[in-house]
């Protein structure tokens, strides 16, 4: 049994990351590979976090954020289970108008990849122990963080204390770390819930991602490896309990008439999950010796498939800022360092939050004049090749001033 001094410190690191999930884990790997010592605390043990029952979601990882995972040393473990997105087809209910994107119009690389969240978690939990500068502490619970003028000290439920120059909160939308720092959020609910599952089908999807806008919300069929697709079925929240309560046969019947028969016979593979949908953003991404990343800073509707991508953009920018500061011998938790991160990320994230919110409000209704206007818009954009290319490159994370990791460059 270890006896802890009431004022002592058991673990010291340059950075403490609270939350070892998809974004926090990637951040820890990136920092450790670049020579910054990092401790990662996660309330779930690796075995529980990698179980099929823990998280049924998959994430769309665009080309630029995929490079972030490469630089962090994670992509090689993910790649065998990543389904490339070669084409995207967007349609509005029964309308004959649609929007079609083909990756060949902008290069040889896929738009992105569909990856099960547990695949990314496996990569993180297998990579972290191999990094000399990283220490994973899980399962463990942070019960308090003292953010002093010179360092931060986190106390775990077992009494251990961790000291770091900077705490990075990657503990999700309900971030206890953000709340303890007194950072407020702005949030609104959509009255929608996403039903998520994996669907096996008879015919190959050929790497085509399908998104159908229905009155209740988007219905996305996303290509995974093999003859499988990840399904994100957005439905009005009050209807979801009855849908989820159906037996396998009833659920498949409910699903099939929305899914259609273009991929032949279908079957649900594994468990199904449901997640209420909302948008939220933190009033600030930083506080004294604290930075927020991923869902702790911003949470968006999955309509554009950008949630994970914008978390990895946070990783790329904050990691670059911290590595540069570390090499200059600067205090990693100083206001100047944190202000630079917030300045580079907040505006970009707010633009995407606004865009996804506008898309949800525009397409999640069945009002005749609005439906007609958006259908005409889809048809017009589909014919405007230069504009389509701009949209494609933006979605791939290829436009603008990109941090080094998104360009595939080592830190």
Image (tube, rainbow, N blue to C red):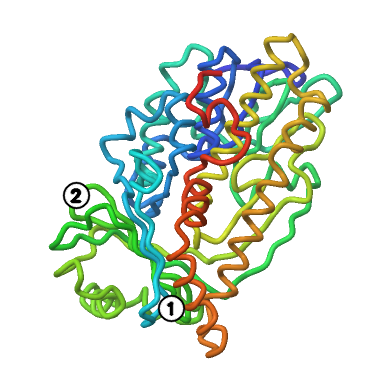
Q: Going by the image, does 283 lie left or right of 398?
A: right
- Residue lying farthest to the right in this orientation: 149
The C terminus, quarter of image:
top right
- In the image, residue 404 lies at what x, y percent? 57, 25
Q: Secondary structure at mark 1?
A: strand
- In the image, residue 380 lies at what x, y percent? 48, 70
Above or below residue 331? Residue 166 is below
Report which quarter residue 332 is drawn in: top right
Report which quarter residue 37 is drawn in: top right
Identify the disc placed on residue 226: 2
- In the image, residue 203 lies at what x, y percent? 14, 61
Q: Residue at x 24, y 79 (%)?
A: 253
Q: Residue at x 50, y 58 (%)?
A: 304
Q: Secondary structure at mark 2?
A: loop
Between residue 399 and residue 57, name the one nearer to us.
399
Disc 1 designates what residue? 214
Q: Residue at x 33, y 39 (%)?
A: 108
Report which quarter residue 154 is drawn in: top right
Between residue 54 and residue 5, name the one nearer to us.
54
Between residue 1 and residue 164, name the one nearer to us.
164
**Lower position in the chain sequence, tag 2 or tag 1:** 1
- In the image, residue 353 lies at what x, y percent? 64, 57
């Amino acid at each position: 049994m270890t006896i802890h001094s009431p004022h002592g410190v058991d673990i010291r690191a340059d950075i403490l990351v609270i939350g070892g999930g998809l974004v926090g884990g990637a951040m820890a790997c990136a920092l450790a590979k670049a020579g910054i010592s990092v401790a990662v605390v996660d309330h779930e043990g690796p075995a529980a976090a990698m179980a099929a029952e823990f998280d049924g979601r998959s994430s769309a990882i665009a080309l630029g954020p995929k490079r972030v995972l490469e630089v962090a040393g994670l992509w090689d473990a993910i790649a065998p289970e990543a389904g490339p997105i070669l084409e995207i087809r967007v349609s509005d209910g029964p309308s004959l108008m649609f929007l079609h994107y083909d990756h060949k119009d902008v290069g040889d690389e896929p738009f992105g990849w569909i990856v099960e969240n547990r695949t990314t978690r496996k990569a993180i939990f297998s990579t972290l122990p191999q990094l000399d500068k990283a220490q994973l502490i899980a399962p463990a619970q942070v019960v308090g963080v003292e953010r002093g003028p010179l360092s931060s000290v986190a106390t775990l439920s077992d009494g251990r204390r961790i000291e770091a120059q900077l705490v990075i909160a990657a503990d999700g939308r309900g971030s206890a770390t953000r709340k303890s720092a007194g950072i407020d959020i702005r949030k609104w609910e959509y009255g929608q819930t996403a039903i998520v599952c994996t669907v096996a089908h008879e015919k190959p999807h050929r790497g085509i991602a399908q998104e159908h806008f229905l009155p209740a919300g988007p219905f996305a069929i996303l290509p995974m490896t093999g003859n499988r697709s990840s399904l994100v079925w957005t439905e009005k929240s009050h209807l979801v309990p009855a849908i989820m309560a159906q037996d396998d046969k009833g659920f498949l019947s409910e699903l099939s008439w929305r899914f259609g028969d273009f991929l032949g016979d279908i079957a649900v593979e594994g468990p199904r999950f449901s997640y209420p949908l909302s948008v939220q953003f933190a009033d600030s991404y930083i506080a004294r010796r604290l930075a927020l990343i991923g869902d702790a800073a911003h949470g968006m509707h999955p309509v554009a498939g950008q949630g994970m991508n914008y978390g990895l953009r946070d990783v790329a920018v904050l990691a670059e800022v911290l590595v540069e500061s570390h090499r200059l011998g600067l205090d990693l938790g100083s206001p100047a360092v944190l202000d630079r991160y917030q300045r580079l990320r907040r505006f970009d994230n707010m633009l995407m939050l606004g865009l996804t919110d506008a898309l949800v409000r525009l397409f999640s209704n069945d009002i005749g004049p609005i439906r007609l206007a958006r259908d005409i818009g889809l048809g017009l954009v589909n014919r405007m090749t230069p504009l389509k290319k701009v949209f494609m490159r933006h979605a791939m994370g290829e436009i603008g001033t990109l941090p080094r990791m998104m360009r595939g460059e080592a830190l």
